[in-house]
Image: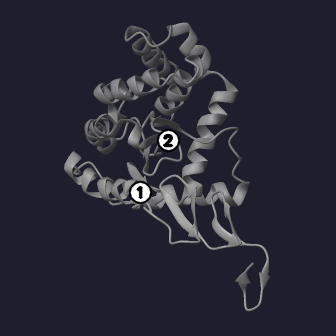
């Protein structure tokens, strides 16, 4: 039933309007460059218990691989987790207030997960929405991320509210209906809170190994041929008349007599 409700909401989003194009790529990433050989994405809801259970291992993965992978998180608040949109917008507020400081962004996620029970479902049933926001603002100030006043100002910002909505629509546009959802190089995986660091390594290590394997260089070209190192660790032997083209290899631009180079 919960999956059906998310599917219906996502369907309404597509019927009612075009999904807005974000002003920058969605989410926040750590580790290596965004085009690293292994790019892992996590779509999370700050008030999702399964996301909370997955998070310690996520941090282990980030620590284990450092700059060898790119790990990116996206907010995807689920409608059946009370206050999840508020907590998700809070992450966008922290990112904006700290100029996208990754330490602050990941600390917010970690701290909200650790204190998830404070804002989860029945815990706030006797509170108004302004009281919930005020509670979250006081918490953020207490752990030293931004001042309470700055956080509250971000929570009433139309721009940051829109940014949070666009992130949610972005996840819908990719067909996601639950959290956590993990992707490796754009492919949805079966990863969940049961995965250990060893499980992650069993998938990531072969990807890195296949890209880090270096082809054996050509030691000597035959007589009459010229060595062409057209890319790092990639070498060919060019025939007479061929030219060495960077990022391409040996190519002939003067074909005569049966496609022979002269």
How was the colour assigned to the protein in this rendering?
one colour
Q: Which quadrant is home to the C terminus?
A: bottom right
Q: Position of residue 218 (x, y in %)?
A: 45, 63
Q: Which residue is mark 2?
A: 74
Residue 164 visible in the picture:
yes
Residue 178 visible in the picture:
no
Any mark on residue 57, and which? none
Pick the residue in front: 240 or 189.
240
Q: Position of residue 37 (x, y in %)?
A: 45, 51
Q: Position of residue 120 (x, y in %)?
A: 35, 33
- In the image as oriented, which residue stretches furthest toward the front? 223
Label 2 SS: strand
Asked if marks 2 and 1 touch (Cβ < 8 Å), the reply is: no
Label 1 SS: helix
Residue at 58% across / 17% down in the picture? 97
The vertical placement of 213 against 161, above or below, is: below
Give the quarter of the image for residue 145. top left
Q: Which residue is mark 1?
A: 211
Pick the residue in front: 209 or 93.
209
Residue at 31% across / 35% down in the picture? 59
The vertical placement of 209 against 149, above or below, is: below
Residue at 63% across / 35% down in the picture? 163
């Amino acid at each position: 039933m919960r999956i059906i409700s998310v599917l219906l909401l996502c369907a309404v989003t597509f019927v009612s309007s075009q999904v807005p194009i974000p002003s920058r790529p969605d989410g926040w990433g750590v580790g290596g460059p965004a085009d690293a050989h292994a790019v892992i994405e996590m779509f999370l809801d700050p008030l999702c218990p399964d996301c909370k259970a997955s998070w310690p291992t996520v941090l282990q993965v980030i620590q284990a691989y450092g700059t060898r992978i790119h790990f990116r998180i996206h907010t995807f608040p689920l409608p059946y987790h009370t206050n999840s949109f508020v907590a998700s917008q809070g992450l966008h507020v922290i990112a904006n207030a700290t100029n996208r400081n990754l330490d602050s962004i990941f600390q917010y996620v970690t701290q909200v997960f650790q204190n998830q029970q404070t804002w989860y479902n029945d815990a706030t049933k006797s509170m108004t929405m302004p009281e919930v926001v005020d509670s979250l603002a006081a918490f953020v100030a207490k752990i030293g991320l931004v001042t309470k006043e700055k956080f509250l100002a971000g929570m009433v910002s139309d721009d940051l509210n829109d940014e949070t909505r666009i992130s949610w629509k972005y996840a819908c546009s990719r067909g996601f209906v639950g959290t956590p959802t993990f992707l490796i190089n754009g492919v949805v995986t079966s990863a969940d809170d049961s995965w250990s660091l060893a499980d992650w390594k069993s998938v990531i290590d072969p990807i890195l190994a296949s890209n880090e394997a270096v082809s054996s260089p050509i030691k000597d070209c035959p007589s009459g041929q010229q060595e062409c190192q057209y890319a790092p660790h990639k070498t060919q032997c060019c025939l007479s008349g061929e030219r060495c083209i960077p990022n391409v290899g040996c190519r002939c631009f003067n074909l005569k007599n049966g496609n022979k180079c002269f």
